Amino acid sequence: QVQLVESGGGLVQTGGSLRLSCAASGSFFRPDAMGWYRQAPGKQRELVAKITSRNSTTYADSVKGRFTISRANAKNTVYLQMNSLKAEDTAVYYCNAEILDYRLSLDDYWGQGTQVTVSS
């Protein structure tokens, strides 16, 4: 059983910063690509940032230059550093990971979500 546990969400003022963390635990070989998605009320879930096992990154245009995704492979953890936060960044942020099991089969997992609220 694989679990993704997120932390670091909260309430911040416009222009402020937050750092999200997501740790994968359980029995598996290693995480492959890991990423962050978000869903605002009444909107579809969207990709925020993604990082491959080789540290290649992808960002949504709306967060480029403000957010930075990184990972610590030894800790099976992915981070999202969010700077210059705007009201439109308010959403529930979900961690996603493609996990390789010991048969080298790839499965997709989601965290429970963490609320980020940016007040103006």
Image: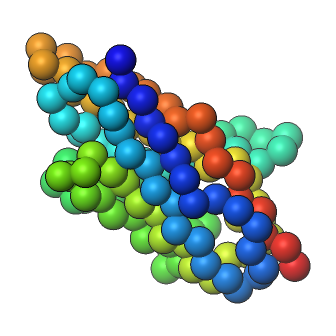
Q: What residue is rendered at 57% in x and 60% in y? A: 8
Q: What residue is rendered at 52% in x and 47% in y? A: 6
Is the residue 18 above or below the residue 103 in the image? below
Q: Is residue 103 left or right of residue 13?
A: left
Q: How is the image coloured?
A: rainbow
Q: What residue is rendered at 35% in x and 38% in y? A: 24
Instruction: Classify residue 120 by image quadrant.
Output: bottom right
Is the residue 35 above or below the residue 12 in the image? above
What is the x, y in percent for residue 23?
38, 45
Residue most toward the left? 103
Q: Is residue 111 left or right of residue 13?
A: left
Is the residue 66 above or below the residue 25 in the image? below
What is the x, y in percent for residue 30?
19, 35
Residue most toward the top? 103
Asked whether residue 117 is in view, the answer is yes
What is the x, y in percent for residue 112?
59, 35
Instruction: Classify residue 106 by image quadrant.
Output: top left
